[in-house]
Every structure is written in structure tokens, then in C-alpha cells.
Image: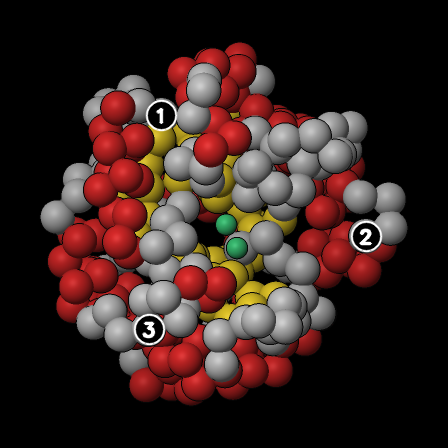
Amino acid sequence: MLIDSHCHLDFPDFSADLPGVIARAKAAGVTGMLTISTRVAKADTYRAIAEAHPEVWHTIGTHPDGAAEEPDVPAETIAALATSSPRCVGIGEAGLDYHYPDAAPEAVQERVLRAHIAASREAGLPLVIHARDADDHMERVLADEMARAPFRAVLHCFSSGPRLAEAGVELGLYVSFSGIVTFRRSHALRDIARAVPLDRILVETDAPFLAPEPHRGRTNEPAYTADTARSLAGTLGLAREELARITTANFFRLFDKAAGTPPGAA
Ligand SMILES: [Zn+2]
Ligand SMILES: [Zn+2]
């Protein structure tokens, strides 16, 4: 049993055949999947997908690419949307992303991230953190907020440097690995994975993006969690079943609300 801890089932890539996507995931042993919000304004869409498919949970939040579109959503609004949806098990994804030249200003992204951290504390739900080309800024914000009051979180699709992974683990965060860890040239990322404590590791697809080997270049889908897990098990010197057992236990420890509504118990 594997859980895809991060996918985007609302994307148009999946609209033609979502039942088929979910059936292929289950056939590959991926029995649960967490579909991730990119805009608070679309909360109803995520909730509807999770309520239509008992294998799916969802989150609520604003992706940093949308920070300029949703710069001032109060933490209380995000928390209330999350706690009122039975299958909403997390906040986010939120974070900092300076990869593209048209990214929202740093101050706006930071404000939105801090609002999501506040929502995470208020709702008692973990935060899904997106960080890209923002290592130092992210480390500062996380350390500052954790010192203010604790919250639970995962650094998703980890592709930052070793220092942010180390800082995140020290702060009690989980680290989730996507198909990037299967790519031939990702030696540095595999070194990071070997340094993260086993009880903090999650696996994900980030579908429809970043298909793992041997599907690289195709539309990613939750079934391919199995390929990333197989590759990561090899990297860590674990049997596939052992990696599946560990990452599934980690998922339900972090997203503890999901443990109350397991796959099939919609
Ligand atoms: Zn992301
Ligand atoms: Zn994502």
C-alpha cells in the first residue's frame, strides 16, 4: 500500500478520465491520494473531487504562483474552509517560489505563507510547503514561525539544497520526494534523501508534473508513485514493501485527520 501525498487531480489533464486515473493508481498499489489546492477560490472543486472518490483527500490553500491573485485571504477563512470539509486533511500548498521572473513580490509571497502557517495552527492540520529557489528565505520564515508557535508541515517535492532539508528536519518537518529523485542526474537529491530520518519521509507524484523514470516526459499520474517508491527504496537500501510501510505510516501520522477517513470510508 502506497499513498500519493501530493497530486493535482483537478487539472485538465485528468478531467476526461479521473475514474480511470484512480483505478490505475489502485491497480499499482496506490490506495490513497491527496489532491492539493492551488487557489482558495477553488475550494469547492477540491472538496467535490474528494467527496466523489473515497480514495482521495484534499487540502485548501494558495500556491505561491497565485499569491498575487489571493494576497489577503485571512488565516481564519482558510482554517474554516478546511475544518468544515470532512475530507480536507491539510493546508496548502503554500510557500515561496522565485523560479519565474514574473513571480509575486517576496513580501507578498511571505505574507501569504505566514497566513497559511497561522491557518495550519488554527485548524490543527499540517501545512504542505512549496519551496523553489528560495532556500534561505524559506529557512528564515520557518524558523521564525516555529519559534513563535509550533505547527506541523511537509516540504513537498523536495528540490532545495541540503541546508533547507536539514533545517526542516530540525524543526520537526517531513520531507516528501517526487519523481525528481528517480532522474539520473539527481545525485545530490538522493544524498539528501539518505540523510533524512526514515520516519520523516513521504512520497508523491506532484502529478500531472514531473513523471518519474521510466515515464519521464509523459503526463504524470498517481499510479507512478510506485515507480518513485521503487527507486527511492533502492536509494535507501530498503525493500519496496518496507519503504511503502514506512511512508504510509508517516503519511497517516502527519495527516492524522486522514486516518479517521481511510481510503474507501467516504
Ligand atoms: Zn508545489
Ligand atoms: Zn503541487
Question: How many dots with numbers?
Answer: 3
Residue 235: percent from the left, percent from the top?
78, 43
Nearer to me, 105 or 251? 105
Q: Residue at x 20, y 72 (%)?
A: 74
Mark closest to the chain's N terminus, 2 or 3: 3
> What quarter of the picture does the C terminus occupy?
top left
Label number found at residue 55: 1
Q: How far is mark 1 from mark 2, CA to CA?
A: 31 Å
Residue 142 versus residue 195 in the image, above or below: below
Q: Residue at x 71, y 47 (%)?
A: 180
Residue 256 versus residue 118 in the image, above or below: above
Taking the image as shown, residue 137 lies to the left or right of residue 185, namely left
Label number found at residue 185: none
Q: Is label 2 or label 3 in front?
A: 3
Element type where label 2 sits in the image? loop
Crowding around mark 2 (Cα neighbors within 10 Å: few <14, some 14 to 19, many 20+) is few
Give the residue number, with chain letter if any, for mark 3: 71
Q: Is mark 2 within 8 Å of ligand 1?
A: no
Element type where label 1 sits in the image? loop
Taking the image as shown, residue 234 lies to the left or right of residue 74, namely right
Residue 255: percent from the left, percent from the top?
35, 47
Q: Is mark 1 within 8 Å of ligand 2?
A: no
Give the residue number, with chain letter if any, for mark 2: 186
Mark closest to the chain's N terminus, 1 or 2: 1
